[in-house]
Image (spheres, rainbow, N blue to C red):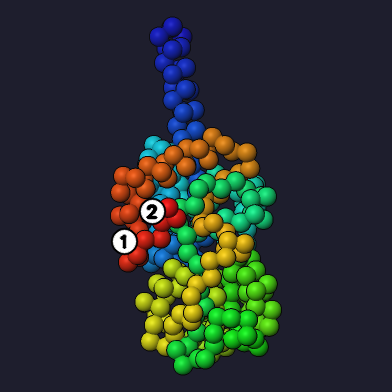
Amino acid sequence: MTPKHIIAAALGIFVAQGAAADALRIATEGAYPPFNFVDESGEVQGFDVEIAKALCAEMEAECEIVTQAWDGIIPGLKAGKYDAIVASMSITEKRKQAVDFTDPYYAAGAALIAPKDSDITYTPEGMDGKTIGVQRATTYAILVEQKFPGVSLKAYDTVENHNLDLQAGRLDGVVAQQVLMFDWLENEGGDAFEFKGEPVKDVEFIGAGAGIAVGKGNSELLERLNAALDTIQQNGTYEQINAKYFPFSISAE
């Protein structure tokens, strides 16, 4: 091999390593519309997905979006199946023991949705004895369990499934993320259901907002994501994505 070929081969290895370093696998749930969902063609779409792709573009990183069931999404990150999670994950102290979070990229409260003709109120007294649906292993489940002890709690694998039971009359109400349920009311449940009271934004339960999770100690990726997040918020990209999905800003800034 000539010196020129040796240099070319070494350069090829360097480029390949650089490309690999800038290839990111990002997990999302794929069952939490409009934030993340799988469309009719099998493509993963939603606010979370577009934010993830915008961040990858800003970091000049090749971005692969993969779906993972919610119950296993943090274990999957810890096992190295992907590099980050962009899945509307609330930043909480408990989760911070398992993963590191970026700055919040949006914030929304925990809303109670019930039939329009229901006299339920979003208070411990008003929910006492009521059957309330929540998604399993979420901050909303913990919130209802601890702040509304008189509730009969029913946990579901997805928000879609507790909404179906609400429509079927098997629940008195559901507690879920405010923006997510706004979309559901706009598209499916608005004729018969409505928000009851004001959303709960107790940081103790809901956290500071939704953040991007990375593996513990992965400070390099965390810094890159935070820098990219700041940039898309400043240059109008975030606002454009926000406006595509919501008639109001959900920015955590």
Q: Residues within 10 Å of mark 1 (few under 14, many from 20)?
A: few
Q: Which residue is at a point 35% across and 65% down the rendered structure image?
A: 248
In the image, is residue 130 above or below residue 24?
Answer: below
Helix, strand or loop at mark 2? helix
Nearest the eye: 43 or 250: 250
Q: Position of residue 77 (x, y in %)?
A: 60, 49
Q: Position of residue 201 (x, y in %)?
A: 53, 66
Kind of residue indicated by mark 1: Lys
Furthest toward the top, the residue is 3
Q: Which mark is residue 15?
A: none
N-term-proximal mark, 2 vs 1: 2
Tell me if label 2 and label 1 are in contact, CB under 8 Å: yes
Q: Which residue is at a point 31% across and 60% down the rendered structure image?
A: 243
Q: Is residue 126 left or right of residue 117?
A: right
In the image, is residue 109 above or below residue 81?
Answer: below
Q: Which residue is at a point 30% across and 49% down the rendered structure image?
A: 236
Q: Which residue is mark 1?
A: 244
Q: Position of residue 159 (x, y in %)?
A: 52, 72
- Is residue 211 in sight in this rendering? yes
Q: Which residue is at a point 44% across and 82% down the rendered structure image?
A: 194
Q: Residues within 10 Å of mark 2 (few under 14, many from 20)?
A: some
- Is residue 37 in sight in this rendering? no
Q: Is residue 137 left or right of residue 117?
A: right
Q: Position of residue 56 (x, y in %)?
A: 41, 43
Helix, strand or loop at mark 1? helix
Give the tally of numbered discs: 2
Q: Which residue is mark 2?
A: 50
**Comparing labels 2 and 1, the label whose residue is closer to the camera:** 1
Q: Residue 171 falls in which quadrant of the image?
A: bottom right
